[in-house]
Image (cartoon, rainbow, N blue to C red):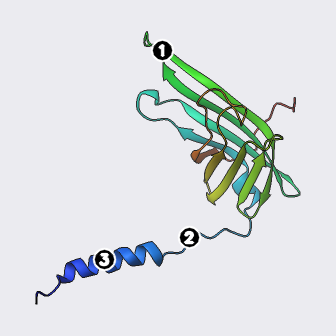
Amino acid sequence: MKRPDVRVTLCVLTMAFCAFGVPAQKSRPSVSTAEVTGTFRMNFTGKFKGSYDEIKIASIGRGKIRVFMDLLYPYKLPNGDDMANLGQLDDDFSIKGDTATYTTPSGACTLTIRFLRPGTIKVEQKGDDADCGFGHNVMADGTYRKVSSRKPKFDDAK
């Protein structure tokens, strides 16, 4: 009878431990006003390097934050010119622990902001571009890094 290779056995055991033995990242009980407040960007790479999606956030108290998203979907026209579809949102999100959420009045779009660690947020969008009121192909999904800790200025037309 052939003996199994020890390296193969260790590899299988390691993969099983990684798949089942690592707990999911736990939610923090709360995040500070300083961590929440600021301007966050997700930079594009490749041929659209220099462009970015931007999110401005300020704590407004009582479990709420004000969020302004300025998003784009860059693309090239057949003649080679740069073009972009735009999407914006300016509204209050509810925040509990390290997670802020917003649902459109129609209920078709939900945006979730998770404060992963100081200076980094992850945004998840459930619903398509039109459900969220964004331009064609514009999505908020992604990981954003803080570029300013200053309290952002908002257009008070809201």
Viewer-side residue, 98 vs 138? 138
Question: Would you name the residue on which mark 2 appears?
Answer: 24
Can you tell which quarter of the image residue 26 is in? Answer: bottom right
Q: Which residue is mark 3?
A: 12
Question: Residue at (63%, 40%) from the top-left corner?
Answer: 140
Please, what secondary structure does the residue beneath circle 3 have?
A: helix
- The residue beneath circle 1 is 77
Query: Which mark lies nearer to you, 3 or 1?
Result: 3
Q: Quick check: 93 left or right of 62?
A: left
Could you tell me which residue is drawn at 70 percent across and 46 percent down? 38
Distance of label 2 from label 1 (alpha carbons): 42 Å
Identified at 67% across, 42% down, the residue is 127
Q: Residue 52: which numbered mark, if any?
A: none
Residue 150, can we see it? no
Q: Amino acid at mark 3?
A: Val
| Image quarter of the C terminus | top right
Residue 28, percent from left and from top: 68, 68
Residue 146, above or below 51: below
Q: Taking 59 as reference, is 50 left or right?
A: left
The three-letter code of the residue at mark 1 reads: Leu
- Which mark is first along the chain, 2 or 3? 3
Circle 3 or circle 2, nearest the eye: 3
